[in-house]
Image (spheres, rainbow, N blue to C red):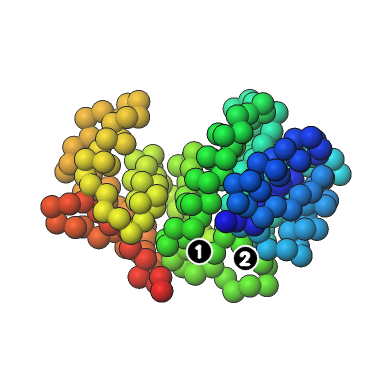
């Protein structure tokens, strides 16, 4: 399982989360404030972070922004009592991979964390943690925002429309597997205002996405009669 850092100033919550995640098989370190968290991130390698925003000494958003400067691909799940949409957007814009408001269901936390770690380990992704002194990200490395229509390729932002992002997110979540046309259209038509998308229109969006992935090791292959397959030619 994963080596995780829990950053939470509430001792009871921190201990409870640690116990739950250790029971799930993860290796856990903890930090009670933002300064301690930054020190741990300097000296230890983690595969994921559970981060409270309301931290003493150094606030959670500052921790997140500093973390992203050194470790652009490290998965981060935010926990916070701030439930306003502006707070959610601010956290996601600062680089969080997912967001959960307090009070929360611990089973949901575990499910979201597992999903985040699974996405980070897909073949289309680069390593989960990378220090400032490490080589630059491979151009094939990819990170897709799970909520907002954004993605990063080799550290560079990809400009995506809502449909392009939905398509890319679906392909990444099923990297190495064939995704049928029907699956893509079903995802699009499940969103408000997206009804009536045709199979021909799908080809247009696949073509656009291929162009935006050009120059990387990633490729969307058309599997005749079946659907689309996201491949990473640079994966060993």
Residue furthest to the left in view is: 225
Query: Is 167 displayed left or right of 159 in the figure?
Result: left
Q: Mark 1 Cα within 10 Å, few/some/many (few <14, many 20+)?
A: many
Q: Is residue 173 above or below residue 189?
A: below
Whether residue 75 is situated above or below residue 134 in the rendered picture: above
- Residue shown at 30% from the left, 35% from the top: 188
Across and down, in percent, residue 28 comes to: 70, 52
Residue 125 drawn at (x, y percent): 47, 60
Q: Residue at x 70, y 43 (%)?
A: 19
Residue 85 located left or right of residue 151: right
Q: Quadrant of residue 69?
A: bottom right
Q: Are marks 2 and 1 in contact (CB under 8 Å)?
A: yes
Extreme-front residue of the structure? 23
Q: Which residue is mark 1?
A: 126
Residue under circle 2?
130
Q: Nearer the viewer, residue 97 or 18?
A: 18
| Secondary structure category for the residue under label 1 | loop
Q: Residue at x 21, y 30 (%)?
A: 196
Let me know if residue 61 appears in the view. Answer: no
What is the CA distance from the residue labelled 2 to the residue labelled 1?
9 Å
**SS for dot 2:** loop
Q: Is residue 155 visible?
A: yes
Q: Which mark is residue 146?
A: none
């Amino acid at each position: 399982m994963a080596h995780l850092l829990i950053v939470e100033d509430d001792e009871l919550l921190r201990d409870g989360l640690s116990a739950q995640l250790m029971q799930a098989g993860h290796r856990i370190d903890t930090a009670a404030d933002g300064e301690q968290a930054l020190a741990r991130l300097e000296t230890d390698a983690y595969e994921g972070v559970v981060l409270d925003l309301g931290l003493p000494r150094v606030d959670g958003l500052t921790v997140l922004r500093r973390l992203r400067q050194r470790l652009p691909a490290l998965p981060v799940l935010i926990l916070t009592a701030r439930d306003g949409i502006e707070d959610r957007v601010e956290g996601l814009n600062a680089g969080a991979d997912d967001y959960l408001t307090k009070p929360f269901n611990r089973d949901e936390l575990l499910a979201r964390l597992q999903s985040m770690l699974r996405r980070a380990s897909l073949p289309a992704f680069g390593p989960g943690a990378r220090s400032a002194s490490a080589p630059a990200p491979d151009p094939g490395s990819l990170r897709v925002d799970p909520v907002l229509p954004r993605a990063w390729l080799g550290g560079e932002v990809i400009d995506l429309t809502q449909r392009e992002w939905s398509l890319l997110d679906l392909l990444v979540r099923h990297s190495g597997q064939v995704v049928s046309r029907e699956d893509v259209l079903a995802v699009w038509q499940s969103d408000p205002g997206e009804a009536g998308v045709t199979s021909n229109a799908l080809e247009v969006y696949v073509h656009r996405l291929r162009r935006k992935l050009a120059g990387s090791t990633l490729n969307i292959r058309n599997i005749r009669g079946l659907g689309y397959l996201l491949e990473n030619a640079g994966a060993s």
